[in-house]
Amino acid sequence: MLKEPSLSYSALCGRLAQINPQASLTSQGLETRVNRHESVEYLQRIFQETLLLTLQKSYQNISPELFNHFPRIFLQDSTQFRLHEQLAPQFKGAGGSGSKAAGKLDVVYELKTQKFTQIKMSKSTIPDQSRAQDFVEWVQEKDLIIRDLGYFKLDALQELQGKNAYFISRLLHCTDVYLKPDSSEAINICKYANQSSPKSSVIELPVYLGKSNRMEARLIMYRLPEAVVNRRRQEAKKQAKKRGRTPSQEHLALLEFALFVTNVPDSIWSAEVVGTIYRIRWQIELRFLDMEIFIIYSCIKR
């Protein structure tokens, strides 16, 4: 269905028969089943089981002791997906050369209980940043939140820190970074890292983020292989061209590194461990294609 979304119910029944010759279903029977709430619950459960198996493989080689300090660990991510243009009034797309109708799914997954704590559906034009503070109010002391770059918002991170909770986030490249709380000038972190640690594969700096009301954090920089750097720069130029822009030389230079900020102290996690832990969140992205099946059935009523 994902490869050929325009297939009719009759054609889908034909595909079903190819997969399982014992399954005999009419187009009316399939329509009835698709539009039942139980179908949504079923597909959601299938996705949850798939994600669980994937995440288990990802962290089974990580020492459980690394997670002992945190009562709960939340992974948050989102994905966008195209919808039939008839759904544009409810799920407006980007327009132009993009889809007229598109949706966004925001997912929060608690790693220790292996359950979804939030699944939100919205139109694709709502930015992830607007949801950065969505569940801050029910975060508790010592909880850990691991998020994608799209959710980066200093105010939200400061709120988490104020509740004595922990976070790991990728660093937004335009964020002002200072070495001291009273510094008058932000540093060029790429230039500073290459001058102070030109041969180090992992660089850690205690920094302060933001022009005003600065927040203390650990900045961890992983030097990337040349092939990865070139690919990232090509993609950055491609995306900038679509928007009629040219990426700055500073931005292109920063793509030499994977950049993370965290308030988890080095007494709990070394700089090398932070990157290993963050890879668990990437597994959610790998399962979002499976999630789209659930999305289609849960939001489209034919």
Image (cartoon, rainbow, N blue to C red):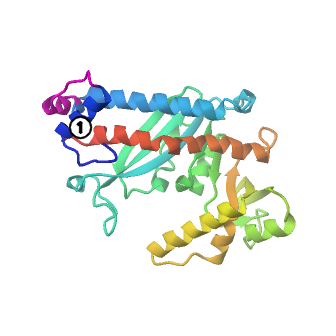
Nearer-the-camera pick, 1 or 251: 1
Please name the residue that numbered disc 1 is placed on: 12
Q: Looking at the figure, which quarter contains the N terminus?
A: top left
- In the drawing, does residue 89 fall left or right of residue 221? left
- In the drawing, does residue 129 fall left or right of residue 180? left
Q: Residue 28 lies in magenta, yes or no?
A: yes
Nearer-the-camera pick, 94 or 291: 291
Question: Quadrant of the rendered structure where residue 53 is?
Answer: top right
In the image, residue 112 above or below residue 164: above
Q: Residue at x 73, y 33 (%)?
A: 66
Q: Residue at x 64, y 40 (%)?
A: 165
Which range is magenta?
A: 21-33
Q: Residue at x 27, y 47 (%)?
A: 5
Residue at the farthest top position: 22
Q: Residue at x 74, y 57 (%)?
A: 221
Q: Secondary structure at mark 1?
A: helix
Question: Quadrant of the rendered structure where residue 253 is?
Answer: bottom right
Q: Position of residue 225 (x, y in %)?
A: 72, 59
Q: Is residue 173 visible?
A: no
In the image, residue 223 above or below residue 275: below
In the image, residue 70 above or below residue 251: above
Q: Looking at the figure, which quarter contains the C terminus?
A: top left
Q: Position of residue 226 (x, y in %)?
A: 71, 64
Q: Residues within 10 Å of mark 1 (few under 14, many from 20)?
A: some
Q: Residue 266 lies in magenta, yes or no?
A: no
Q: Position of residue 47 (x, y in %)?
A: 43, 33
